[in-house]
Amino acid sequence: MFYVEANNLRKQYNQGDAAVLAVDDINVTIDAGEFIAVMGESGSGKSTLLSILGILNTPTSGKLFIDSIDVYSLSQDRRADFRHSSIGFVFQSFHLIPYMTIVENVMLPLAIVGRSKREKKEMAETALENVGLKGKGKRLPSEISGGEQERVAIARAIVNNPRLILADEPTGNLDSKTAQGIMELLGLLNIQGTTIIMVTHSNEYARYTHRVLRLFDGRILS
């Protein structure tokens, strides 16, 4: 069974002579198919924890198991391959490349996939259709709305059919109507079997999830 298990995760940053524990001895298990909200004040360690769970930020100590694999014991190359094949990311600032078309942005995670360019384009177009953007693949990011840009970011996250999606404040820059649409889309993806871990400040959007992890000073309070 695909699951995420964090054992005694710690992440320490050195600021001059001071040491800051951004993540402090976190233990948590997230089952396959769960939709989890991670909440807490600014500086509580939410984004750092998400980056560790996404195999983007090596912890100072502790272990992370995904699908029973001790992912930080893997080589850099195998770690990257695992991340690209199993995890999708949705960032608050979208991270779309402005001079590339929408479909080209969605195709980016497919760069290492052993398929033809035509097949990759078809996969990207299917992902765009799944988020309600059929027919808009030839546009540039500047030619669509903020809500549509967020949908492109989600399409890029799901183009590889990942089993885990990590979303960092995916509704943070959106109006309430558009944000609700994004939450409904994430909820649908979860119903279809994708495990989702989402950082959010919003109690309203946390209600879409199964469970809330509340962080304070790098620790889970509840």
Image (cartoon, helix red, strand yellow):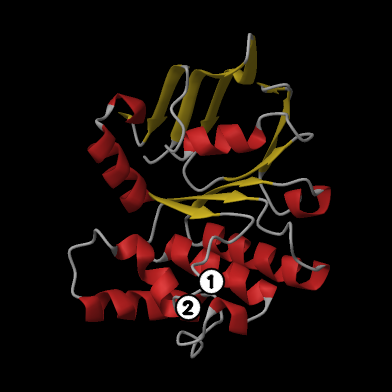
Which residue in the structure is indicated by mark 1? 152
Eyeballing the image, is 221 above or below 108? above
Is 138 or 211 nearer to us in this picture? 138
Eyeballing the image, is 9 above or below 56? above
Q: Which residue ends up furthest to the top in the rendered image?
A: 17
Is 87 or 94 nearer to us in this picture? 94
Query: Which numbered dot is residue 102?
Result: 2
Quarter where residue 212 is shown: top right
Residue 93 left/right relative to 128: right
Q: Position of residue 140 (x, y in %)?
A: 52, 81
**Could you tell me the amino acid type at mark 1?**
Val
Q: Position of residue 194 (x, y in %)?
A: 48, 54
Is residue 126 shown to the viewer in this render? no
- Label 1, secondary structure: give it: helix
Quarter where residue 183 is shown: bottom right
Q: Position of residue 167 (x, y in %)?
A: 58, 51
**Could you tell me the amino acid type at mark 2?**
Ile
Residue at 38 percent across and 41 percent down: it is 2
- Label 2, secondary structure: give it: helix
Q: CA distance from mark 1 to mark 2?
A: 7 Å
Please tell me how crowded label 2 is: few (under 14), some (14-19), or many (20+) other residues with Cα within 10 Å: many
Eyeballing the image, is 25 above or below 187? above
- Quarter of the image with the N terminus in it: top left
Q: Are marks 1 and 2 in contact (CB under 8 Å)?
A: yes
